[in-house]
Amino acid sequence: MNGRDAHYDRKRGLRRLVHLEGVAKQAIDISHVRLIAVAAGFALCFVIIAGRLIGLAALAPANESTAIPAEVRQLKAERAEVVDRNGVLLASNVRAVSLFANPRKVMNADQATTQLVSVLPGLNRASLQRKLSSDRGFVWVKRHLSPRQQDSVNRLGIPGLEFVDEERRVYPHGRLAAHVVGFTGIDNEGLEGIEKGLDASLVAGHDVRLSIDARVQHALRAELMASVEEFQAIGAAAIIMDAHNGEILGMVSLPDFDPGAMSKVSTDDRRFNRATLGVYEMGSTFKAFTTAALLESGTANLNDTYDASKPLHVAHFTINDDHAKNRWLSVAEVFQYSSNIGSARMALDIGTEGQQQFLRSLGLLDRPSLEIPEVGAPDLPSPWREISTMTVAYGHGIAVSPLQMVRAYGVVVNGGHDVTPTLLARDDGDRAVPKRILSEHTSQTMRALLRLVVDEGTGHQAQAEGYLVGGKTGTAEKPCAGGYCRKALLSSFVAAFPINDPRYVVFVALDEPQGNERTSNFAGAGWTAAPTTSRVVSRIAPLLGVAPTTRTLSATADSLLVSVRKGG
Amino acid sequence: MMRPTVIAGLVLLAVMVTGLFELKYEVRALYQERAVLHGRIAEEEETLRVLKAEWSFLNQPDRIQEYARRYLALGTPIVRQIGGIDRIPFRAPDDEVAQAAVEARTAR
């Protein structure tokens, strides 16, 4: 190679180099840009991550607490509590351990059965053996073990047996409000009472506050039990209701049961709620409605008289008076002496339609609603003939529940406003303006008449020292095959106190009471239900903050009677 | 010119990785602590429920009535024992009380 060539070559090479350099520069530029872009992208990501890290480290504790942890929510999900109006616990849950088995893993079913029966008395040996030798993967051995039982099963060391934690419903007050609270099944599903009626709400975790007052409930139940004992009654029912807002402060049905020992629904008589599900012919307590309807219709006043001089014959029936006066009686006297004849004649003046309309407005002809499912529908005469109108006037031929009676009496004495019985505590705020059913005037007259019955009528034994009680007795013969039984009575008393401005309505009924020496063998309401009511009122009035009055009984009665006798 | 950036980047990376791991373990520890605390809260709540049920059980009116009858020298209140605050007379002025006390002492 010479210089020229070299030059040429160099030149060519140079030229080629320059050319190459142009292409390379382009590629390098492109890759450079890409590199910067990628680096920038990474840098951005790292900056974001760094920022997030700083944010998490520095600020996290502040916003973490806003979320509710899953565990806490789970705790709330169990069945809610039932408490009385003052927060006394009536139904709650405690943790209980249940024992189940996987029979496929149980090696020696015979031996396991023998061992289990020895530490868990109450197990059925045959059925356990059958369960353990079956080919299933899961069988319950025993639900809700005590810690001691759990320990002794653990000590047996039988393979294939396992424990699981469950919630068990407990009723710390036992029988106290059995028919109100009701009970649940083994899987905590509501079966009766509030447990059934408000099952959905309890399952959702909403605590239930009842209108029941445990102290009032206890007093009511204790007095009722004493009377059942004294008069050898087969059962009894009682309700105390606030006449203004319908809150039921106490409700007892005897005989009762221990809700903690219940697990199945059955037709056992103890579970039968006589206070709400049972319907009975109430007898004379119905006369209050006949009298109120008559006064309200304006067809007669208190001084108008009715012929009660001789028994009343209608169709095949004869209507007699138990305390016959055999003369014409004023409207007030018909009530005071509890005249069937007079009431029947009054009902004829009101008319069938007027009577039905009035009874319906008091809720006596329709099935009432309450927060528990055990609510009975009334038994009405069908067809409703004129004779039905006459017998219904004194409480025969129609059967209603004690729940309906307290509501109707509540309306009669509270000034004539509608009232809806409830088992849930009401806030004072949510009281709507109640519908008017009776005139204030009729209600006042009825209070005076009810006081008259206690002051100088059949309800004399319902007097409670220091408290002004007004009420009406009702002694009804229970229906038997082909008629009525002379010996099987339903003796009831409906009272309101303090009668000058009634706040509470008390209903007491004894199912088939027997007379004794003290009552000269009488089993009527005046001898049985009335004194029970007196004791109940004396006991609960101080609890409810009703101040005893020093007004003497006769003075009060006189002032009331003056208004009654003036034609009120 | 590139070298300081790379070094700075690597250092930053190392710091961040360490920080991330630290944080992760810290979070895990806190999470465990939280689980333990929730377990303890659940236990305490269960204990509370049992105690509340027991308290209610021990407060059964039937039971208290029986104990009151057995151990207290108290009877059922009667109507005469219930009254308003206005029925209680005002206390006599102090000097009168002192005077009465002196008189009582001298009389004895």
Image (cartoon, coloured by chain):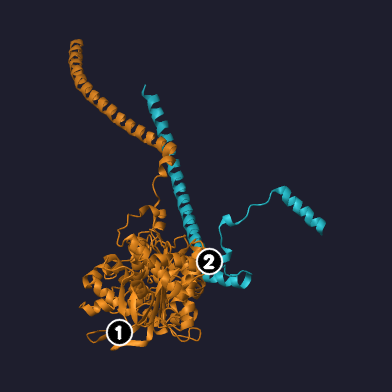
Chain colours: A orange, B cyan
Instruction: Report the front residue among A92 and A164.
Output: A92
Quadrant where the image shows the C terminus of chain A: bottom left
**Which disc number belongs to residue B3?**
none
Query: Chain letter of disc 1?
Result: A
Residue drawn at x 30%, y 78% as measured from the top left: A307
Query: Chain letter of disc 2?
Result: B
**Which disc number belongs to residue B59?**
2
In this image, A154 relative to A432: left or right?
Answer: right
Look at the image and tell me whether residue A40 can be seen: yes
Instruction: Report the front residue among A479 and B26.
Output: A479
Amino acid type at image mark 2: Asn
Is label 1 in a helix, a strand or a loop?
Answer: loop
Indicate the position of residue A402 as horizontal and vertical percent values: 36, 72
Instruction: Report the front residue among A1 and A301.
Output: A301
**Which disc number belongs to residue A311?**
1
Indicate the position of residue A119 as horizontal and vertical percent values: 49, 78
Residue furthest to the top = A4
Tell me the crowding category of disc 1: few under 14, some 14 to 19, or many 20 or more residues within 10 angstroms, Cα based: some
Whether residue A175 is situated above or below residue A323 in the rendered picture? above
- Picture quadrant where residue A564 is located: bottom left
Instruction: Report the front residue among A530 and A152.
Output: A530
Whether residue A411 is situated above or below residue A141 in the rendered picture? above
Residue drawn at x 35%, y 70% as measured from the top left: A405
Q: CA distance from mark 2 to mark 1?
A: 56 Å
Indicate the position of residue A126 as horizontal and vertical percent values: 40, 84
Quadrant where the image shows the N terminus of chain A: top left
